[in-house]
Structure formats: structure tokens, C-alpha cells
Image (tube, rainbow, N blue to C red):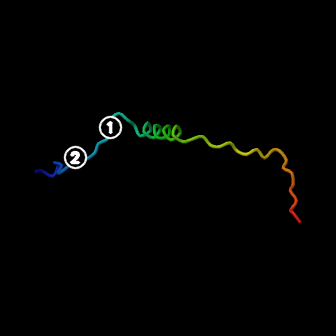
Amino acid sequence: MSATESKGQPLPFAVAGVSMRDLLAAGEAAALISTPPRAPEPDFSEPVEDHREAA
């Protein structure tokens, strides 16, 4: 067996024709789709009444 022949299981290979940019974009799209929407931010624009401490 020559040094260039593989021994054991073949090495994994990349699928031809898919760029790294496409793979990264697909991962970002999957993350956006699978992430639940954020809860609405509380509205602090209305004044809050001051509460006095009990004596």
C-alpha cells in the first residue's frame, strides 16, 4: 500500500457547490426562525405614584 492510499475509513468531504457564505447565511436564518420573539419592553413613560413607607 502506498503512502497516498487511505487506511481505514474515508475522510469526510465537503459538498461541492456550497459556499461558506451560503452555509453561514443558512445558519443565521435557522437561528432567527427558531428563536422565540422577545417579550415587550415595559413602558416607563407613564409616571409612577410614589409609595410612602408604612410608619
Residue name at image x 52 percent, y 37 percent: 33
Pinpoint residue 40: horizontal percent, then vertical percent: 68, 42
Task: Say left or right for 7 vs 38.
Answer: left
Nearer to us in this view, 19 or 32: 32
Pinpoint residue 51: horizontal percent, then vertical percent: 86, 56
Which of the marked residues, 1 or 2, is nearer the chain's N terminus?
2
Helix, strand or loop at mark 2: loop
Pinpoint residue 55: horizontal percent, then vertical percent: 89, 66
Task: Say left or right for 12 vs 51.
Answer: left
- Amino acid under disc 2: Pro
Task: Say left or right for 45 vs 40.
Answer: right
Query: What residue is pinned by disc 2?
Result: 10
Nearer to us in this view, 35 or 20: 35
Helix, strand or loop at mark 1: loop
Residue pushed farthest front? 55
Query: What residue is pinned by disc 1?
Result: 15
Residue name at image x 84 percent, y 50 percent: 48
The answer to whether marks 1 and 2 mark residues whose Cβ atoms lie closer than 8 Å is no
Residue name at image x 25 percent, y 47 percent: 11
